[in-house]
Amino acid sequence: MRELAAASSQALAPSRGAVLLSLFVAGFATFLNLYATQPLLPEFRQLFGASELMVSLTVSGPVLAVALTAPLLGILADALGRKRVIVTAMLGLAIPTALAATALNLGELILWRFLQGIFVPGVITVAMAYISEEVPSEIVGSTMSIYITGAVVGGFSGRFLTGLIAHHYGWRVPFVVLGAITVVGALITWGFLPRARKFIRQKDWGASHRSVRMHLGNPQLLATYAVGFSVLFCMVAAFTYINFYLADKPFQLGPAALGFIFSVYLVGAAVTPAAGKFLDKFGYRRVIIAASAMMAVGMLVTLIQSIPVIIVGMALGATGVFISQAAASSNVGKAAKSARSSAAGLYVSLYYLGGCTGSILPGFFWDRAGWPGCVAVIICMQSITALIAYRLWKD
């Protein structure tokens, strides 16, 4: 009887392949949209007659929305479940994505982009909690890296498709295409993501708020939140202002070429799964310190005014960021002993607040020192990341 029960339980267990596929697709479809306007920023600067800082709000708008709504969606997910929230959020994300094509001015475009960001935490926050709860602890790092890889490929694809389609058909058409792809991604996730088996529904909203206070009193989580803030600050700063650097003299690249520059994301997509194995083997602290150094070196390399060399530098930087992202995301579930959706929600909030800051603050350094000023800010933040991980993280 015991053997029969074990065999029955194994038969009912969700397929690891289905879990990995659906998590990859969820990450892909979500991040397809989030930074899609980056290769269009120089075109928006000319089209709307606005400054670099103003057009960068099409990037910081959705990122700010993520930061503001992530804690609430984390609490809702602890009450409503995992798969339901993920699929609903993906379908909701497709609507303002497509409607962004109707924007008549920069203000309307920023508004639609902000509304896109409201739905994003429903995927990323809950996916992190799903992984930490449903996946065996010894493979959490490698599983998280698959989800991050989907996000990396989606981030590249969104930027590349936007730049390429805009070059041939104008800047509005890409939003319609991205919206349609997001719907397809939602349907795949709905069909393949197994229902959460270890989820415990929280019906007591007071308990949810108490869990948030508990997380804010956890030094390990606070250190992880700080690292997350710095990681996305650096990524958004680098991949936003590099577009202005390459669109101006002496490079003068157009939207399609700028979209192609984001192919460096594919290097990160190839490296991140291996990074998950390194996380499980060598520990989170050592890996993230090495990744921070990689990002800093990559940014220094971009100061050499040669397109191939700049691509190498951005590839190094992107790889360092994605490894750091996998380490920080995995460490949230490790540091939080309970109520992991709310813990992930707080992480996502601080993470994307860092991204919002990274799209705005470097603009002031751009005005005074151009790209070298932005590089200096990024290296400073990477140094802070390594120091926090070294002093406060535990392997």
Image (cartoon, grey):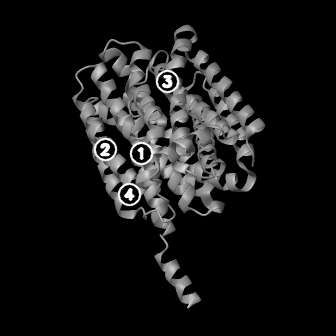
Q: Are marks 3 and 4 in contact (CB under 8 Å)?
A: no
Q: Are marks 2 and 3 in contact (CB under 8 Å)?
A: no
Badge 4 vs badge 1, beta-carbon distance below 8 Å: no
Q: Position of residue 301 (x, y in %)?
A: 64, 27
Tell me: residue 306, above or below residue 278.
above
Q: Amino acid at mark 4?
A: Thr
Helix, strand or loop status at disc 2: helix
Mark closer to the chain start, 3 or 4 = 4
Mark positioned earlier in the residue sequence (3 or 1)? 1
Looking at the rendered image, the disc whose residue lies closer to the viewer, 2 or 4, is 2
Element type at mark 3: helix
**Element type at marker 4?**
helix
> Looking at the picture, which amino acid does disc 1 mark?
Gly
Is the residue 13 above or below the residue 62 in the image? below
Which amino acid, by three-letter code, is at mark 3? Ser
Query: Identity of the amino acid at label 2?
Result: Gly
Horizontal relation, residue 100 to residue 51: left or right: left
Find the distance from the CA under tag 2 to the CA under tag 3: 25 Å
The label nearer to you, 4 versus 1, is: 1
Give the number of the disc on residue 92: 2
Residue found at x 69% / y 39%? 219
Residue on which disc 4 sits: 189
Query: Which residue is painted at 30% across and 25% down in the image?
Result: 109
Q: At 48% from the left edge and 39% from the top edge, which residue is drawn?
A: 71
Q: Is residue 227 visible?
A: yes
